[in-house]
Structures are given as C-alpha cells and as structure tokens.
Amino acid sequence: MMSGTLTRTLAIVRLADRLLREAGVDAAPVSTGLVQTLHPEIEILPAPLGPVASSLVIPGPASSIGKVRLFFHERQSIPRQRFSIAHEYGHYLLHHLKLLDSEAPTDPALREAEADRFASWLLVPLWLLDQAAENISYNAEDKTALERMSYRLASRFNVSRSCMNRALFELFHLRKAFEGSAAAKHRQAKR
C-alpha cells in the first residue's frame, strides 16, 4: 500500500505527462506556450514583481478580469521565468482546479513543494531526460563530471541548474530502483 503522499506525487507525475502528450511535446526544450494551448483561460504576463518570482491571480465571480492571470518576474533569467510559469500553472491545476483525486495539502510549504515538482516534471519530462542522458552514468564521486553534465542538460532543456539537478536526482534514483527490471534490460540491449 502506497502512502498518500507517494500516491499524490505519482499522480502529479502522471498529470504532467498527460499534459505534455496532449500538447504533442516530443523534444526539449518544452515550450511554456503549452499552458495557453491547453488552458486558453490563462493569460501569461511579465511584471515587475520585486522580490516575488511569480504570482497567480484567479478572478472571482464578480471580477471584470475574466481570465486567470499568471505573472512572472520580467527581470529574471529565461530559465527562471519558465520555471515560474510552470510553477504557477501547477498551482492552478493542483490547488485551484484540483485535477487530482486526492486531497490537496493545506500546508503552504507542501503546496509550494508540489508546484515545484510539477514545474520540474513539466519542463524536464523524465522520458526526454532519460533519452538525453541515456549514455550518462551516475558517479557520485566525480563531482566535476556531474556539474558539466548538469550544465549541458540545463542548457538543452532551457532550465536552471537547480531544476536540472532535481530532475537528474530523480532520474538516477528511478534508474537505480529499476535496475534488473525488464525496462533496464531493454535499455541495455539497445546500447
């Protein structure tokens, strides 16, 4: 039996995967334009937000705005802007539309962590990262090689190194968990 947290995490992965497939994503970098393609009710706007990275404004029933407004900080790097857009999109889907069957957490820190996970998986789909990193083996001892690999892949996916490091961590742990499985054997046979 899976814990509720793990079940919800897997559901978030599946949601990001489903959205990417609906948008026809098959290569990196993933365009944040898919947000408006899949949800035209969202308007994405740059704004001078000060210390805030991004913001989501959902109109109430009496609002004259009409659209959901997703603001990102106009002075941040492009990778950070992309992550902010995906993060706020995650909040919209997970905490406003409540697209998952399980109950959304009420703790603000957990909600932020969910939006971060969603953003990472949306911008760095594990199947695309697995393809890009197929010939890369994980050696925790070789920090320089890991940093170079992270930098190259972050550039390819147009994300920050922090986002890429999280994705690589998850990918390598998934690979390790499935060593000896049919999928791993298939991957080995292709080499």
Image (spheres, rainbow, N blue to C red):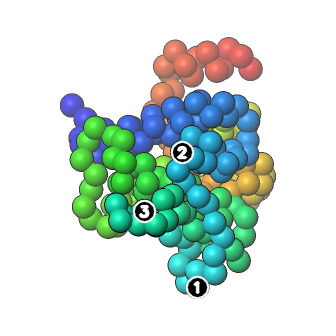
What residue do we see at 53% from left, 63% from top?
A: 69
Residue occupied by mark 1? 50
Q: CA distance from mark 1 to mark 2?
A: 27 Å
In the visual, does 94 lie left or right of 35? left
- Contact between marks 1 and 2 (CB within 8 A): the answer is no
Residue position for label 2: 39
The residue tagged 3 is 58
**Residue 61 in the image: x percent, y percent?**
34, 60
- CB under 8 Å between discs 1 and 3: no
- At mark 1, the secondary structure is loop
The N terminus, quarter of image = top left
Seen from the viewer's position, the closer of residues 151 and 160 is: 160
Depth check: give the residue in front, 187 or 65: 65
Instruction: Inspect the image, locate mark 2, and give the three-letter code of the amino acid beneath it.
Output: His
Q: Give residue 178's position: percent from left, percent from top.
A: 48, 28
Measured in 3D between alpha carbons, the distance from the residue under mark 1 to the one under mark 3, in whole angstroms, is 20 Å
Mark 1 or mark 3: which is in front?
3
Q: Look at 73% across and 41% down and name the residue there.
A: 28
Task: Please tell me which residue lies in front, 157 or 71.
Answer: 71
Up the image or down, 190 lies above or below 123; here it is above
Query: For the C terminus, which image quadrant?
Result: top right
N-terminal label among 3 and 2: 2
| Residue name at image x 41 percent, y 66 percent | 63
The amino acid at mark 1 is Gly
Please give the name of the residue rendered at 25% of the width and 35% of the height, measured from the top-left corner. 2
In the image, residue 188 lies at what x, y percent?
Answer: 66, 20
